[in-house]
Image: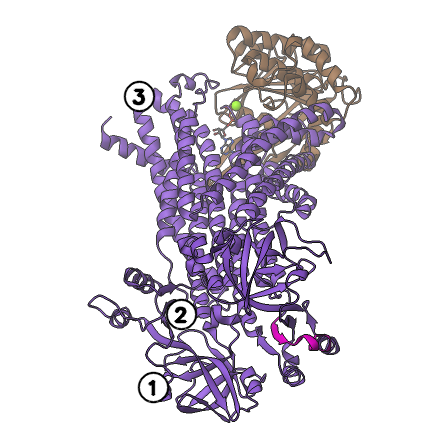
Amino acid sequence: MNSKQNNNKNTRILEAQGVEKVVTLGQETIRILEPINLAIKAGQSLAIVGKSGSGKSTLLGLLAGLDQPSAGSIHLAGHALTDLDEDQRASVRAQYVGFVFQSFQLMPNLTALENVMLPLELLDEDKPQQRAMEMLNHVGLSHRLKHYPKQLSGGEQQRVAVARAFVTRPALLFADEPTGNLDRATGSRIADLLFQLNEENNTTLVLVTHDPSLAARCELEITIDGGRLAACGVSETDMPPQALGQEGLQ
Amino acid sequence: MSLSLRIRLALKLCWREWKAGELTILLVALLIAISSHTAIGFFTDRIEKAMTYKAGDMVGGDLVIHSSRPLKASGSESWQSRANAAQLLHTTVHFFSSVVLHGEEMLLVSVKAVGDNYPLKASLKTSTSAYGEGQTTRNGPPTGEAWVDARILNDLSMEVGQALTLGAVTLTVSRVLIFEPDRGGSMYSFTPRVMMHKGDLARAEVIQEGSRVDYHTLLSGESDAIAEFKNWMTPQLEPGQKIITPGEQQPTVGGALTRAQRFMGLASLIAVLLAAVAIAVSAKHYSARHFDASAILRCLGCKQNDLMFIYLFQMLLIALVGSILGIALGWSAQFILLYLLKDLLPEVVPAADWHAAWSGLGLGLVVLLGFTLPSVMRLRAVSPLRVLRKDLKPLPLSGWFVYGSALLIVIALMWFYTGSLILTLSVLGGAVLVFLLTLLLIALLFVLLEKSSGLLSLSMRAGLRNLLRRKGETLVQTLAFALTLMAMLVVIFIRTDLLNNWQQSLPDDAPNHFVINILPDKVPLFENYLREQQLVSSKIYPMSRGRLIEINGVPVKQAVTKEEKNNESLNRELNLTWSDTVQEENKILSGTWWQEGQVSDFPEVSIESRLAKKLGVKIGDRLTFFTGRQNWQAEVTSIRAVKWESFHPNFYFVFNPSSIEHLPATYMTSFYMAPEQKILLKDMVKAFPAITVFEMDAVLDQLKAIISQVIVAIEYVLLFVLAAGLMVTLAAVQASLDERLQEGALMRTLGAQRDLIRRSQWSEFGSMGLIAGIVAVLGTELVSFLASRYIFQADYSPLWWAWAFVPVAAALLLALLGTFSARKVLTKSPMLVLREGQ
Ligand SMILES: Nc1ncnc2c1ncn2[C@@H]1O[C@H](COP(=O)(O)OP(=O)(O)O)[C@@H](O)[C@H]1O
Ligand SMILES: [Mg+2]
């Protein structure tokens, strides 16, 4: 369990080199992502911002190993994702990665508790139920264990999703507009929860968001525009651009 | 919104949805359902007609009119000109009894005088020597010649080529008769046959004023023309005239035909049910997919009625297109079937009626509209607010009224189609049972799983949860599959039942020769003879002849109902026998059989059940018989079911030995003789000159040919039902595919390997198949019970083989089919989770 948690601040937990994505629709080929380099160290948090349709989710998916880039390579916790097949990437995800989505993406056929148990079960870990209950308790949902997603409000669903994401204490957490479907107050409570857990678990966070205030809470921030890395900034914490990788963020 | 705008909008939306693939499933489901329904309809219609046509061979024509006078129509038009105008072939055959002479010997024979057209259908089988090799001919004897039964040669001590005298003519015996297609009911008659040409009748001077002659007018031709002629002729029949249509006369062929027809009705019925299930599944899916679209249309200003119109119009369009394409497809499919079967079918297979097409069209409209209306009505209620709040689903409507009326229409259609309410209801009863059992079993499974979910592996748990969550969908899918399986099982069961009934009665070594007139003192010798020649025979029964004259002291003609006055068992001498034990395949339906060796003061008799019913005879009734010179009474102590088709010696009346043992009797039995042994017959007849042998093998061969044809047809119809059933299951899986893709992607995002998802799919579909299998066998048991009870009048026995085999096979089949049709879940990129909701 500790092995997969990389506490060494100097290790690059995630690194992308020349990653690009091209899709063909009929005869047209669309370049969704221009070649992108980036690197992030364990425990850091990175915000990806940009207009709708700029390619943020595409980048996130590639970084998390949900999809393969058309060119370039990605290393996640020492695994070259681009050399792995779908099943091998799945087991990397199971070990190192948690997800939170804009549209919650809970398994509709599972209760809140079962949803949170699922990643533990996939890893075949001990006492999944107890740990899932603790986690749900932690996010303030101990009274909703037996409820199905349908029976929960948006905020509650997202809290279940956050609990599910953190229950395996992943090294990396990917969040795609986690507050996008929620009202401001609920959204900010979810954001608080995310950053709190991030802090507690020393998780590396990759966050796609529209919300400048949310982005501002991250150590690093990059902006995507039309598939291109448009800007990179370091917010609040005084992190030198070199921390982002050899070539920096250009 | 104006009507034309509505229509234009509906058409445009329909076209767009078609392009986007939204309507494909619904249309394909309908297409498959209607095409299988119509293919079976067309095909069974034609096969049925072909079989009727074939059965015509057994009575010598497609229509036979029996008459005691030369047939003439009372109207202005003669039946001949009518028949000729309808291009019907016809010929009249004269039957009468007469005595023939050869040298010193004389013999009472049954003469059949035929014309040049004879036989209209099928062929005669004759030989150039007694019990010799048979040849088929399509004509009767020419003038101056006679063709005779082999026993005549024996009885008159003559050879082929010699002459016999009939009245004033001398006819040369040129051939030995082996088989007459139209011997029909007179197959068992005891007087041997002489067949001659009608042209010799006048010269023979045997038919005088007042002689009894039976005229059989045979007609054959197009089935429509035959039916029309029958309709025209029926009202003009005079007393003593009656119309016989193929299948009526011979119990075995008639039974086979009715059973085959019933079977095919059942197959159509099952296709109808499957169609309804497929449509319902697809329609539900369709409406769920249209919640968003409806909300958006409402936002854009569509009124509820506009929406209703647009969707109904689309449904109507789909129904029409699906039905018409389905009918076309079904029409082509039956040609392929006919082509595959061409060796087994007669050269001319009559064209199909269009009623299968009409019923297909009607069915398409009824089923599609009937089963989509509740969903469409739900769409009408979609709140425009849904565009803002996705979770706003319209309340599920109470579809009871709509489903109920759709069901009623389907029942009416099925009834119309099968012509049997009992059949319709028993299948529906089975379906209702399947429905209830599925509910019950799934509920049970819920509890079971809840209890044991800790024990299962993750993949199995994942699969079973999938199964349990979509309770509604799971129910429908399991129901659909269970119904399919049940349909197939019922078909298989009924087919086996048909086969069993025939095959039990006609095993390979079923007796194919009857022998009568075995003299009492020759019985041991004859038994010895059979044993020496290694001929498998039935028991030897004593036989005495007598008439039934009174029931409870009332003369029979007064005691029975009007329709039964002419029952042939009342008008002729009956074969009476006695026995200590019940004949092998006879079954006592009521009363009790006498104790072996028991001497009773009053004669006891056991009567055959159908005759008992016709004559209204009950246990305890006293029957008066006339034998030889005396009247005597016996009390009915039991009623027996008899399988006449078995070709074992069977009797209407069996007495307890002590009551009539003293009557003069000869003995009879039946035995099996292979074709290559037939030469032995000559030797047998020489060794026992008194006996009379009836050769039934040619008749049996003809029967078997018809039966094997029916079986092939049944197997092909089974294939159709199977295909339709699998398609329903595919449609059901297809309906849940979107959800599955999303969930599969999510599982994989969370780190599940494909193998785990594969295994979870296996356990999901496998357990669904298992439940469906169990439920289907249960439902089949019910249908089979009802069917054997009310339709086949056969014994019911539990389907052990089905219990052992079906649930496992169903699990395997559904797992394979399900994982195959959901295989995209394993290949679709998990990126899907990032795309949804955007
Ligand atoms: N598989 C695909 N095929 C075609 N276009 C795609 C595909 N995936 C993404 N896109 C397009 O790429 C662009 C970026 O999409 P996305 O990464 O979802 O943007 P964002 O998350 O920033 O809103 C969009 O224009 C989207 O339509
Ligand atoms: Mg996005």
| Residue type, label 2 | Gly
* B454 left or right, relative to B814: right
Vertically, is B450 above or below B95? above
* B568 left or right, relative to B682: left
Circle 3 sits on which residue?
B301
Question: Of helix, strand and loop, which one carries label 1?
Answer: helix
* B76 left or right, relative to A207: left
Q: Colour of chain A?
A: brown
Q: Quadrant of residue B289?
A: top left
Circle 2 sits on which residue?
B61
**Mark 3 and mark 2: span between their CA atoms?**
70 Å
Vertically, is B304 above or below B711? above
Query: What numbered label is drawn on residue B304?
Result: none
Q: Find residue B542 and report its horizontal and vertical position in percent.
A: 64, 68
Task: Give the letter of the chain under mark 2.
Answer: B
* Label 3 packing within 10 angstroms: few (<14), some (14-19), many (20+): few
Q: Earlier in the sequence, mark 1 or mark 2?
A: 2
Give the residues drawn in magenta, as a range.
Answer: B512-525
- Residue at horizontal 34 percent and vertical 74 percent from the top: B90
Q: Earlier in the sequence, mark 3 or mark 2?
A: 2
| Residue type, label 3 | Gly
**Mark 1 and mark 2: span between their CA atoms?**
26 Å
Q: Nearer the viewer, residue B650 or A131?
A: B650
Q: Farthest residue in the left direction? A: B76
Q: Nearer the viewer, mark 1 or mark 3?
A: 1
* Label 1 packing within 10 angstroms: few (<14), some (14-19), many (20+): few
- Residue at horizontal 51 percent and vertical 79 percent from the top: B192
* Label 2 packing within 10 angstroms: few (<14), some (14-19), many (20+): many
Circle 1 sits on which residue?
B202
